[in-house]
Structures are given as C-alpha cells and as structure tokens.
Amino acid sequence: MFTNYFLGYVNTKALRGALVVALGATLAALTAVALVATSGTAVGQQQGQEAPPSQGLESSAETGVAPKPEQSTQRDFVPAERVIGLNEGVTNSTQGIEQAAEASGGRVVESLDDPKNRAVLLKFPSEQAALAAAEGLSKRPDVQYVERNGIVEGSAVSSDPDVGLQWHHTVIRRTAADLGTLPSAPPTIAVVDSGVDYNHPDLKDNIWTNPGEVAGNNIDDDNNGYVDDVHGYDFVNGDGDPIDDLGHGTHVAGIAAATAGNGIGVEGVSPNSKILAIKVLSSTNVSTYFNVARGLAYARTAKTTPETNVINASLCADPPEELQLLADEVAAIKAAGKILVSSAHNDNSSATTGGCRYPGSDPNTALRVTATTENDCRARFSNFSPASNPTFYNIAAPGDDIYSTRLNGGYEFRRGTSMASPMVAGAAALVWGKTPILTREEVVNTLVSTGAKTSCGFVAPTRRLDVRKALLGTSETAIIGQLLDPATGRAPGQWPVFGSPPLATAKLFSGNTLLKADETTQYGFYEMTGLTAGTGRTLKATRSGYVSSTLRTGIRIVDGKVTGPSTDALPQARDTGNATVTVDWKTHQPRTDTDGCRDTCNGWDFEIWVTVPEGVTDPNGNPQLFVTSAGVTGSLTSAPFVSAPYQSSTFETPVETAIIGSQAADGIYKVAIWKWAIPEQADYNPFFNGSQASVQMYDGAARLGGGLKRVPSTCGTNQGPGGQWWYVGDLTKIGTSYTWTPKNLCTNSGP
C-alpha cells in the first residue's frame, strides 16, 4: 500500500484477495483550504476488538491511508471462520450444522436468516480446525456452499451557502433552471457503509426513524430481529446504533440526500429522500463478507416509509474465489426489484477479473459507476469498461473533489468512485419518486439511456449521468464550463477561500451581441441555458481585480446538446508594466498508462517556461536562465522578478501562468510551453493533438500580442528526449512596455 503525495491515493492492487468495500472510491482531496479536512482512514485494528486480517472489503474512496500491519498470513480472510450457505427448503433449524461444527470445536456465531439468502457463520479454535471441518460440512445435504469469510476495507440546488462548491450539480444538470419541483417523497436510500452521522445538521432531518422501535429499551419492539434499530443497524458492533466513526458513510449520505433549502451547507442529489443508515465498516475501515451481506440483506428487507428501493454500496471486494454469499445477496436484491448502486473502485484499470471491483462488477448490480472530473473526462483513479465490454460499468458520474458532509457537522472535499456512486443513487431515487410505477429495469434504463456520452479517458463511449434529461426526457441547448485563476488553480478570488465575492461573470457573445451571461459559482462553474444553435460564439469573462477579456473563440452551440464543460484561465489584472502569460487546455486527467488506456487516452501536463535575458541573476547572484512552474518558480519580490506560481499537477487543473514583473530586467523573454510526456513514459498524453492548448498574454489588464494563440497542428506528434516544446514567441521588455514577436514553432529542445 502506498500514499500519493497529494491525493492520499490507496493502491488497492496491493490488497489482493480482499473484499474492498469500495467506499465509492473516496480519494480525499487534501487541499490547503480551511474548509477541507483530511479524512485519513488509517487501516488497522479497532480498539477493543479482535484484529482482522489485513485484506477484504474496502471503500472506493481515495483517502490518506496509513500502512496496515500484517496480522495474519491468511491475509484475505478472517482466520478460523467459515460461511455456510444453506440450501433452499432447509428448515430454520441449524442444529445439525452446529453439531457437526462442534465436533471440530466450532460454533455458530452469526446467522443470516433470510429466505432468499440463508447462511451461518462458524467460528473454530484455529484455521486448521476450520479446514478439517469444511470438507465434511460441504457434503451435507442441507449445505449449498462452504466459503471463507473475507475481509472488507474502506478504499468518496438551493440557497444553501456551499452548494456553489458542489460543481457536480452543474455537470450532471442537477441545477438546470427548468428542472421543476422535485419529488416530495422519493424512495428511501440505504447507505451501506461506515454508518452515518445522523446528528449532522444537514442530514438529521432526512434520517429514517423506525416508528415501531423504542430507542434504548433493549427490546426488539417491531420483531424484525434487530434490537433498537431506530435509524438502521450497526453490523460491526452488533447493535442498533449505526453512528459513523470513520467519515466515509457521512460523506456518501450527503452526496445522495443532504437536506436542501435549510440555509446551511450543501444539498444532496435527492434532498427529499430518507436515509437508512447501515454500518458495515469499522472505524478502521474494515469489515467482512458476512457483515456486508447482512447489511445488504437488512436494506433489502427493511420496512420503511417511503420504501427502501435504492441501496448504495460504495464498496468493493477483491475475492480470489469465495463469493457465493455476496453474489446470492446481490441476486436477491435484483429479484426484489430494488436498485443496487455500487462503485467501480480506484485501480485505474479496465480488467474485468481480479482486483477490487465487486459488487460493482456483478451484472446483477443495477448501476455500476465509474468516476469523472470537472472536465467530463475519466478521473485518473477510476476503473473503466474495456473496449470488448463497454457496459461492464454502465454509467459514470463526477467523483473528483466532491464537496459533502463530514463528521461532527462539518464539510469536506473527497474524491473517488465512492463519491460518484451516491450521485447515481440519488438520481435513481429522483426518477423513481417522480414516476413510482416504473420498474427497476425501467429506472435503470432511463438513467443510462439519457446520460451524456463521454469518451475522454475512456476506451469506449460511456454514459455520464444527466439528471435533467432523466427526469424530463427532453434535451437542452446550453453551455457549461469553469473559470480558473491560473495563479492558484482555483476559482477567481482570494485564495485559499474559494471564489471570494464578487464572483466572476461568464458571457457568451455572437459578434458584439451578448447572448447570455451567468455569475459563476464559488467553484468557478457557469451555465447558460436556453441558447439557440450557432457557430462562431465567443466566451468572455469579467470580475473586479481580474482582466476583462475574450477567453475562447469559435465556440459551436449545437441544438439539443450541452456544450462543455471546458476550462478557461482568467488571470488577475496587474498594473501596467507587468506582463502575464496564461495557458489552458482540455484536461489534466487521466494521467497514467494502463491496459486499454495509454498515451492518447490520457490527459496532458503542460508547463510554462520563460527564458530570461542573458545576465539576469537569482537572489543569490547566480545566473538565472529561465523560470518555470516545474520547479524554478522565480519571484516577483526579488530577482529575477519573474514568477510561475502554480503548477497544474498541484490540484490537477489544466491552467498555468507566468508573470514578468515591472522590475524585471529589460530584454527578450522567450515564452514556451513544455509538454511533460514522451511516448516512452507512463504518464500523460505524449502528443499535443487534441489538447486544445491556448496561450494568452496581457500587459497589466490589457491584451497583448493579438489575443489567443492556439497550439499549431504541426506540434502534433513532435517528440524527443527533452519532451516536446511549443515555442510561442518572444516578449521584448523596454521599461514598462512590451512588444510581441510570434514564433509558433514546435521543437524538441527549449528556445
């Protein structure tokens, strides 16, 4: 297991044989924002409990995870335990099995008493004793299967003030102006996870409460087999209190169904749905096959109002062989006509076997969810369908930097397929709530068939969730996108506070005629709807303290389509005599080669380079040859008075900038864009083609050099040991004045 320097990415391939409860792949985004808190899901032994082995079910959330000590040589399973599946028609008595187990020192410790999936869990004094008993048990006429008990681990539009940080609502068209009134009583959503913080101010009003249970009396008042299950059940500790002590389930619950219009925090995709809290993951992010199966069965059979028809399991399993218990439960959920939504997990893989991808890989799981980014490209961590089976995962949703509820009343960003899954679960509840007569299959088909096709980062076109079209059945003509400050990689405003007021305004023009304008969200997103098809449209933007400029030209608006999302750099307006160079491009993700997705399937990593005039020195008096975002970032307050303050890989946003200060030496400053990758390397796209890279320059707040510079097509496949260079041109500085000499050359060495 290893941790990425920025994302806390958990390499779940190191967790072979584990049922990795793909906590919807929560890649915790460890930003420096005061709003964001790391959920660091250290994996280890829960205090006061027997230490389980180090593999099993895991969440699909990419969070910071501490290395987990080896606790057993039997790493994939709980030692000395066996799951005994019972044949249909067997009486409720398990006396014969208990007697057979006792002969080897075993005993029944748990049972799953459901007509559709009956099983018992046996505990033996040692693994050797369990092995000795297994053969005899498997030959009994009342036994369907004998398998080991695998381990599960955690792997992430109203006036509410922080909805503007929930960029995913814009992309999945959850913010469309004509969305209409949302269903008032959609299906209850079961969150099978680490529990839910049911006291959270943005969740407490949507937590399901069992009217037939008296809290705290230690009696099974409603005779459902579970004592004090007032808000759900805790299968980790065996009690009726599913409070979250990990954080993953709380984040997932907020994405699906946080309350809307209460004047605080965020909003869920289905904000009127009730949440059934089911805890199967411990505070150390582990569980077992048996507990997960019991949690799913509880969700399937729960008597709730409204009915629990949608079950979210942001979990994944990596089982080497034994999986009958879980497979039977997934099949039972399907047979019950309920929708199971599960995450694809975070291995950056298109493999259909091995790895942590169950139940997201089971065709009986109704909605199997991959993750996308702000640019509608596959997130770098997300698993994806192979070209030979393009619907292996049948729907995508945003899963990168998703803002939602956290423990103790707070909010945070996380990333992972764990975050994408509850969006789809919320959308399923909306569609079913709007038209309750639909069947399971009809709801699933509606969501998948109305999704927008995206091929960016995928080897086959994949449907990305479109809530508006799923609800209304009609198309819209619109444009969406994001404006970013290239000096911070975040929305225009005072960093580290997201999008400080006043917010930027995006404007769409046809010639000199303003067609539409929209104030961006705190995250920098805009949307303009109700447009008319046309070509040659121009995007401009304004914000106090920032340049007022043309950001993009030649935009085509297609009837019945949503154009975008795209990213454009909006730099700060500096005093005259300070030259600003910006670059933006299509996407930074995905970034690492994997089977089925190499080179041109990836995003791009570009770096701005500014070669300074001969004789310029750094603050220590040493010769300064260049300034670049790739390490030699320079300074505006000391020599060389040239700075490249932001590297795109920091927040994985496709923008960068360089500033030549008014105090910089006179002379020629050569401006170039360096493409990091070459085909021999494993990261990023090695070619300029398709990148949509463009450069702009400003002297103070005024445009410099004639506007947008687009990467020439001749750069396409240029490559070499030094990477690829787009030599854009020269800025000649004399005092506080600049002149621009275009070069527009593609070379294998820097200018």
Image: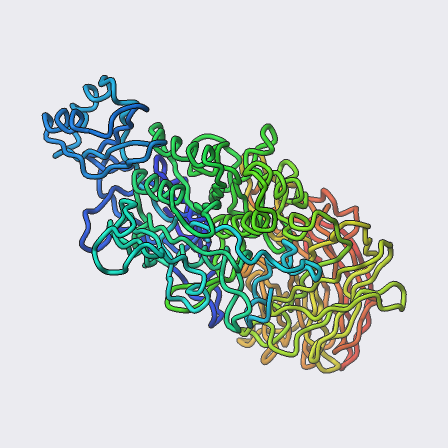
The residue sitting at 74% across, 74% down in the picture is 542
In the image, is residue 174 above or below residue 225? below
Residue 293: x %, y % from top left:
34, 39
The residue sitting at 55% across, 60% down in the picture is 651
Q: Quadrant of the C terminus?
A: bottom right
Left or right of 45 in this view: 343: right
Q: Is residue 454 visible?
A: yes
The residue sitting at 60% across, 70% down in the picture is 522
The residue sitting at 59% across, 67% down in the picture is 158
Left or right of 528 in this view: 305: left
Which color scheme is applied?
rainbow
* Frontmost residue, 707 versus 8: 8
Q: Is residue 12 visible?
A: no
Quadrant for residue 99, please give it: top left
Residue 449: x %, y % from top left:
66, 40
Residue 745: x %, y % from top left:
78, 53
In the image, is residue 741 above or below residue 385? below
Left or right of 452 in this view: 52: left
